Image: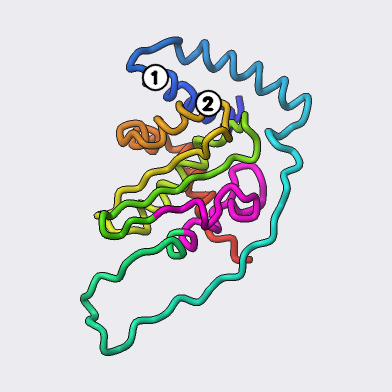
Amino acid sequence: MSSSLSLFCWVVWLLVLFEDNKKIASYDEIQNFIMTQFILRKMVSGLINANPVVYEKKERRVRSVPSAAADEYAVEPIDQQEIFDHIRDIKDPEHPYSLEELKVITEDAIDVDDSRGSVRVTFTPTVEHCSMATVIGLCLRVKLLRSLPSRYKVDIRVAPGSHATEAAVNKQLNDKERVAAALENPGLLDMVDECLSPSYE
């Protein structure tokens, strides 16, 4: 079995294992079911979304630099543009495009309340049955956890009505224990790091 398929099985198994805090099916049963679906899908298209629409990137805006007279120890507020700049270049797990180019994320879908230390990113998978939605959400969360001060609470959501298992994906992406468990899987962590690596374009 390919490492990507094995990884996908592991992610789905985690989702099922923790759903309503009870194990519904064994890992082997889920793996066999997913393998069958994976083979059938490969026979039909080869990719979940073989021909995604690619959009033009927005021009990068220059951020204002605080004056030299400003207190160097002052906490600078974080805004929507800064969050977007952190995540816009994350690569899609199955295409050589950024999440911005696929319109999986947009600046308008980011909410920041700096006074409360909260950030919410709502993303839109390219297809409603996208099996990579959890991986994309995990990439967004990891990138922001690595980039923002620890005082910020990050909330990652699938856009309402954009995914067949929206509630389950949202639940998984915002559960600290599930996220921590997912990142203990070396294969999944490698995939996340690959998506977060610079493209140098």
Secondary structure type for disc 2 = loop
* Rendered residue at 71%/52% (across/down): 54
Q: Is 186 inside the magenta-drawn segment?
A: no
Q: How crowded is mark 2: few (under 14 residues within 10 Å), some or many (20 or more)?
A: some
Question: What element does badge 1 sit on?
Answer: helix
x, y percentage for residue 31? Answer: 54, 17
Q: Position of residue 73 (x, y in %)?
A: 21, 76
- The residue where tag 1 is placed is 19
Q: Quarter-wise, where is residue 55 in the image?
A: bottom right
**Circle 2: residue type:** Thr
Q: Marks 2 and 1: which is nearer the front?
A: 2
Kindly identify the amino acid type of the residue bearing the numbered disc 1. Glu
Q: Tell me the chief SS of the magenta region.
A: loop
> Which percent across, then down, holds residue 86?
46, 60
> What residue is drawn where x is 64% and y is 42%?
94
Q: Which residue lies furthest to the bottom in this view?
A: 69
Q: Position of residue 160 (x, y in %)?
A: 52, 36
Q: Earlier in the sequence, mark 2 or mark 1?
A: 1
Q: Say which residue appears at 35% left-offset and 13% top-offset.
A: 22
What residue would you read off at disc 2?
A: 165
Q: Left or right of 111: which side holds 61?
A: right
Q: Is residue 179 above or below residue 1?
A: below
Q: Image quadrant of residue 69? A: bottom left
Q: What stretch is highlighted in magenta?
A: 84-111
Quarter placement of the N terminus: top right
Q: Residue 70 carries which label?
A: none
State the quadrant of the C terminus. bottom right
Judging depth in this view, the residue of 6 and 59 nearest the camera is 59
